[in-house]
Amino acid sequence: MSITYSDFRSDTVTRPTAKMRQAMAEALVGDDVLGDDPTVLHLERLAAETMGKEAALYCPSGTMANSIAVKMWTNALEEVIVEERSHIYNMESTHMTFISGVTPRPVRSARGAMDPKDVVAAIRKPNVHTPQTTLICLENTHNNWGGAVVPLENFKAMRKIADENGLKVHLDGARIFNASAAAGVPVRDYAGQVDSVQFCLSKGLSAPVGSLLAASRERIDFGRRLRKALGGGMRQVGVLAAPGIIALTEMVDRLKDDHARAKKLAAGISGLPGVKIDPATVETDIVIFGFEHPSISVAAMLERMRAKGILALAVSGGIRMVTHKDVGDEDVARAVRAFKEILT
Ligand SMILES: Cc1ncc(COP(=O)(O)O)c(C=O)c1O
């Protein structure tokens, strides 16, 4: 008998809705490299407007959007301040060195919010030995800090430091709509504190593909050349941009349901043998918890969960589970039941 899985591995596993598939089938298309795909142009305008920036660029992935952002703000022999657990530093195959020829300088943080004093201390002035710091990268929500929301106040502090030291600020806002929904802060307010922002359509917003990079018109024009150089110029790509428009206009409001389910999941498993989680730390859709059991390793736990139809991922010292459109209340209840059956 085949098993159906409740897939909590990531919010990237979300499938496009029926309406998205319909929109893909009916999308008007042109050649986006020649600049005349109407659906892409519509999506880019919408993204720029949503973020309060002059222009936006449709990219195949968040990693490419972040790569273009770093490249468009830096030159070789420079350095970029990154949060030490950030995705851009740890999970993007070191494009900073590979593509931009700059070094990342990791700074510790409290749940994704770097202390302004630590950031100021990390800024380097160039001399014959050292690179010049030119960019600060932020991430909100913070994936590896369990979907933590970085407060707007911290953004303002980073902006001030950047202005005082002639630096630019880029936001990896892969899940900026989750931050906005959880904090009640409009995405424009976060974006207003940074020089560029990238956000993903293909995570909780459920589009199959795509991220947008928003910034000034001049930087986005340059970013478009960088995207082409990286092989990211796509042709009749309106078929992929069409579900992105639905993601932005119709899928944002439901993110709060994912957050409520993540809290329910955390509350349901906290206190079980081996599970180390404080449910109060779960702010959005990501639940990361330590797992230390006398007789069950993380790998064995994931295997036992899989046998009960629950998919999750291993992270350093623990387990990561993410709620999204395609896991409902019944999937959360099934997961909690599976944990209890295995651990008690
Ligand atoms: C915070 C963050 N930034 C960037 C990315 C990269 O997105 P993509 O997988 O589309 O390259 C991810 C992907 O999970 C992410 O979580």
Image (spheres, rainbow, N blue to C red):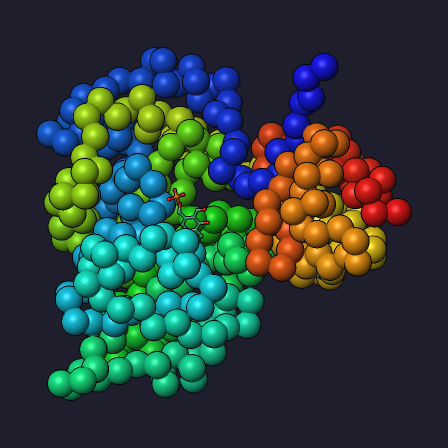
Count of all numbered marks drawn on residues in the image = 0
Q: Residue at x 79, y 38 (%)?
A: 338
The picture places residue 326, in percent across and down from the top left corner, at 60, 30
Tell me, yes or no, if residue 47 can be seen here. Answer: no
Of 241 and 312, nearer the camera is 312
The picture places residue 51, in percent across and down from the top left corner, at 35, 49
Please identify the residue farthest to the front as the structure is shown: 295
Q: Is residue 242 above or below residue 92?
A: above
Tell me, yes or no, if residue 307 can be seen here. Answer: yes
In which image quadrant can residue 122 be found?
Answer: bottom left
The picture places residue 79, in percent across and down from the top left corner, at 25, 72
Of 44 and 98, nearer the camera is 98
Q: Residue at x 74, y 32 (%)?
A: 308
Q: Is residue 314 left or right of residue 240?
A: right
Please identify the residue farthest to the right as the structure is shown: 344
Q: Residue at x 35, y 64 (%)?
A: 137
Q: Is residue 27 left or right of residue 248?
A: left
Q: Is residue 327 left or right of residue 190?
A: right
Q: Is residue 135 left or right of residue 139?
A: left
The quadrant of the rendering that contains the N terminus is top right
Q: Residue at x 41, y 54 (%)?
A: 91
The picture places residue 184, in percent across and down from the top left corner, at 56, 54
In which image quadrant can residue 271 be found?
Answer: bottom right
